[in-house]
Every structure is written in structure tokens, then in C-alpha cells.
């Protein structure tokens, strides 16, 4: 048996500049590091090493087959300061308990039942577009943010959140960059940093309070008027579910989960739709094929959950957008015990990053990886299961991935039925924050297809 050898990577002298790049220019720095190979080793700070792994085999080892040895890394502390200890940021028994309680909400059958509300919300937005004349320019990212928040509010909490859209958008403008900057700064993050971001929140317009107030109000109102006939939505489930010891979630735990689903749920969908529309405008042949499929499958009627299986090109368009701009663009874990990943020794305590952004651009798996080509997803028989991980993998994969796909396909199909949108500038570059957002606003010209 051969002796494991370490991974290549920058020298100790070059490490500070590389870490600075990961903080302030993460995507360009990741692409640069990928030149060393699928596994890169970087001295992060004295006694601690960072491994960046970008092959599907690495992803499966860390995220699935040996996931019990890899806990959430220090990089999630900044997210925890913003979102509390919800599913996205919690670990250990807290995460296991919450996941067991929430899993029934996101079964395939339950998720299919969300379709009518998704369709209703999308229809309302499209009806508002009908007031515009052909050629009107709209700011698409703001439109789809409002739509995504409306859908999350109605589907998961049976409430109208559209009145909070402006405040939550302002909150995200401050909070998401703060989460991103905290990712690779272990020596700057801790209890003091948590207090600092919350104090700064008050000085910069109160983004945390802007989120916290409607969430607290939502919980208080539901407690005052509980649903009689059993849980009707996610919030009812959070309020009534009991674990194996018959213990219910506290109000603080419920608040953290509601905040997590409200922010992460709508941010993911809004970003996905923004990229889909921008990419379709930049690739008219792909858009023509999408219009043909939507017209043929739906024949002018509104879509239903059962139509998703027939909308194979629409689904491929969404999946290719997720390949290029994955919602979970990087995942970091900390090795509990020493391990060997595909011949690379990983000392206990090391941080292992599995950036979907790099896995999805691995040329050994994805030929011509920067090319936008939805045909990649019309057949995946020969593709490694962990070659496409837009929502992570293993037990910690995003619980709402099925909901996100249903929502994106239904909304994109309805938009395509009625409108064609054209970029008024070139395709934007991505900006790495908690998600991969377009790096600028998305003004697009609106043309009615009917």
C-alpha cells in the first residue's frame, strides 16, 4: 500500500495573500487554486490547514460516506450570528432533533401540494406585469425577490410577506456580505464578533431587527390563533411538533428556524430565477427551445406539479443554472478525526472545503465547463452522483431542495408562457455572498408573447 502524500498548494509565504483572496475575491481565488489539482492544501493559520477538494469523489467522501467525521466548520459562525441555530447553521444534537421534526413537511407528497400556491403567487406577479407596455424595462432581481418572498410566506407560513419585502431586501444587503466575509476569518470570529455584527446591525439601519420583528409577530399571532385541524404549514408544525422525549421547540428555536427558512428559502429561489432569465436572454436558442416545450406541454393552461416531469428542458435549464451558479456554492467541514481522502491525509482539526463552484467546473466531469449547455441534464446515466451538488449532499443536504426545484420550474414555465425578457446589458458576473448573486442589478426589457 502506498503512503499517503499531502496535497499541493501555495507556500507558507504565499498563504496570507491567498487567504485574503478567499475573503475578498473568493471565486477568482478558488479558480486560481484549482490549477494545483482537485485537492489543494493551504496553511490557514498556525497549526491549522485548509483543504479545498473539488472532485465528485471528494464530495461524496466528505459529505456522505464519512459525514460523521466532518462537522460544520468555523466558517458557519458568521451565519449563526445572523440566523441563530436553525437547520442551516446548527450542528450535533440540535440539528438532528430539528431535522427529524421538520422532515415530514418536505416529503415529496407534501411538496407537490405547494404547487397551487406557487402558481397563484406567480400569476399575481405576471398580472402586474400586464400593466406595462411592450419594451418596458423592469428590474428583474427585485421582481423575483418579491415573488420568492411571497411564495415562502404563503406556502410555509400561510401569511402575506410582501409588505416586508423592502425591509428584508435591505437586511440582506448588509447581512449576506457579512456572512461571506466571516467565512475564512477564524482569527477574527468568535463571541465578540457575534456581538459586533449585531451591534453594527443597529448602526446600519437595523437589518437584524427588520427580520426579527415580523418573525416574532408571526409566531405570536399563530400562538394566539392556533390551527384547529392539525398542522397546516411549516409554522404550525414547528409550534406543535414534539421530539421523542415529548419536548416542544422553544420560541427562540422556532424563531431561528422561521428566520432561516424565510431568508434562505426566498434568497435561493430569487437568485436561481435571476440567473435563469439572464442566461436565457444571452442564449436565444436555449430560450426558443424552452418556449416550444412550455407551449407544447401546457397548451396555454397553468402548470401543475405533475407537469414538472414533462417539462424536461425547463428542468434542465434550471439545473444548468445551478451548475454554473450553485445556491450552496461552497461547503466547509472540520475533520473530527484524522482521515485519508482519495490518498490525501487530513489531520484531525483540519478544515475541508468542498466548493460546488469548483466541483461543477471540474473538466474531468464537465467538458468545456464554462459553457452554458442545458443538454448536459437531459441524460445523467454516466454522471457521478456527486458531480452536481447545488444543495450540498449527505444527511446535511438542504431539506428544501425538492421545494426549490418545484418552485423554480413552475415559475420559469409560467414566465415563459407569457413573457420574453431581454437583458439591456451583458451577462453579469457572479458575486459570492451567502449565495452566488448576479454582481449587479438586472434591468430587462419585457415583451408579451401572447
Image (cartoon, grey):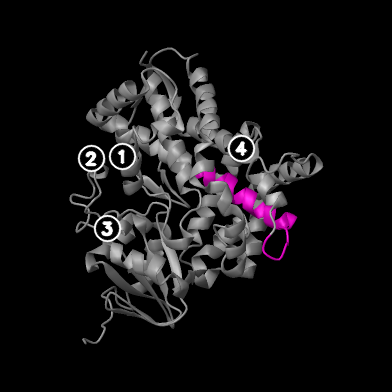
Residue occupied by mark 3: 384
Among numbered discs 1 and 2, the one appearing first in the sequence = 1
Residues drawn in magenta: 243-268
CB within 8 Å, label 3 to label 2: no
Q: How many marks?
A: 4
Residue occupied by mark 4: 153
> Residue 248's quadrant in the figure?
bottom right
Q: Nearer the viewer, residue 381 or 169?
A: 381
Quadrant of the drawing holding the N terminus: bottom left
In terms of secondary structure, what is the magenta stretch mainly? Answer: helix
Q: Nearer the viewer, residue 78 or 286?
A: 286
Farthest residue to the right: give it.
224
Q: CA distance from mark 3 to mark 4?
A: 35 Å
Asked whether the viewer can see residue 442, the reply is: no
Among numbered discs 3 and 4, the one appearing first in the sequence = 4
Among numbered discs 1 and 3, the one appearing first in the sequence = 1
Check residue 316 in the rendering and tell me which mark sits there, or answer none. Answer: 1
CB within 8 Å, label 1 to label 2: yes
Decide whether residue 313 is among the magenta residues.
no
Asked whether the viewer can see residue 383, the reply is: yes
Amino acid at each position: 500500500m502506498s503512503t499517503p502524500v499531502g496535497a499541493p498548494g501555495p507556500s507558507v509565504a504565499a498563504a496570507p495573500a491567498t487567504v485574503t483572496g478567499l475573503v475578498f475575491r473568493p471565486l477568482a481565488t478558488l479558480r486560481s487554486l484549482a490549477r494545483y489539482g482537485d485537492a489543494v492544501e493551504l496553511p490557514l493559520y498556525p497549526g491549522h490547514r485548509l483543504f479545498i477538494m473539488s472532485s465528485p469523489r471528494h464530495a461524496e467522501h466528505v459529505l456522505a460516506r464519512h459525514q460523521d467525521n466532518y462537522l460544520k466548520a468555523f466558517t458557519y459562525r458568521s451565519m449563526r450570528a445572523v440566523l441563530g441555530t436553525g437547520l442551516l447553521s446548527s450542528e450535533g444534537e440540535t440539528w438532528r432533533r430539528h431535522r427529524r421534526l421538520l422532515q415530514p413537511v418536505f416529503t415529496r407528497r407534501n411538496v407537490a401540494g405547494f404547487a397551487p400556491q406557487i402558481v397563484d403567487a406567480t400569476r399575481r406577479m405576471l398580472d402586474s406585469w400586464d400593466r406595462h407596455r411592450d419594451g418596458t424595462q423592469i428590474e428583474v432581481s427585485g421582481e423575483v425577490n418579491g415573488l420568492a418572498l411571497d411564495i415562502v410566506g404563503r406556502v410555509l407560513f400561510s401569511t402575506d410577506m410582501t409588505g416586508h419585502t423592502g425591509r428584508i431586501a435591505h437586511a440582506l444587503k448588509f447581512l449576506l456580505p457579512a456572512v461571506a466575509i466571516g467565512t475564512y476569518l477564524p482569527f477574527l470570529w468568535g463571541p465578540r464578533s457575534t456581538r459586533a455584527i449585531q451591534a453594527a446591525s443597529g448602526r446600519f439601519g437595523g437589518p437584524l431587527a427588520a427580520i426579527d420583528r415580523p418573525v416574532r409577530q408571526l409566531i405570536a399571532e399563530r400562538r394566539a390563533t392556533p390551527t384547529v385541524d392539525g398542522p397546516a404549514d411549516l409554522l404550525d408544525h414547528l409550534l406543535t411538533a414534539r421530539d421523542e422525549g415529548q419536548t416542544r421547540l422553544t420560541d427562540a428555536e422556532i424563531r431561528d428556524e422561521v428566520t432561516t427558512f424565510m431568508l434562505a428559502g426566498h434568497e435561493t429561489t430569487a437568485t436561481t430565477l435571476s440567473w435563469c432569465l439572464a442566461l436565457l436572454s444571452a442564449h436565444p436558442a436555449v430560450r426558443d427551445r424552452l418556449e416550444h416545450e412550455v407551449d407544447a406541454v401546457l397548451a396555454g393552461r397553468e402548470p401543475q406539479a405533475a407537469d414538472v416531469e414533462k417539462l424536461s428542458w425547463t428542468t434542465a435549464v434550471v439545473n444548468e443554472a445551478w451548475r454554473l451558479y450553485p445556491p450552496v456554492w461552497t461547503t466547509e467541514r472540520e475533520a473530527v478525526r484524522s482521515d485519508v481522502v482519495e490518498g490525501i491525509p487530513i489531520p484531525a482539526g483540519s478544515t475541508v472545503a468542498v466548493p460546488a463552484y469548483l466541483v461543477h467546473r471540474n473538466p474531468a466531469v464537465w467538458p468545456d465547463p464554462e459553457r452554458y449547455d442545458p443538454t448536459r441534464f437531459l441524460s445523467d446515466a454516466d454522471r457521478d452522483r456527486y458531480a452536481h451538488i447545488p444543495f450540498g449532499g449527505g444527511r446535511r443536504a438542504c431539506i428544501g431542495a425538492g421545494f426549490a426545484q418545484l418552485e423554480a420550474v413552475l415559475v420559469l414555465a409560467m414566465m415563459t408562457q407569457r413573457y420574453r425578457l431581454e437583458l439591456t446589458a451583458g451577462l453579469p458576473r457572479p458575486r459570492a455572498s451567502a449565495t452566488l448573486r448576479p454582481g449587479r442589478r438586472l434591468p430587462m426589457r419585457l415583451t408579451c408573447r401572447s
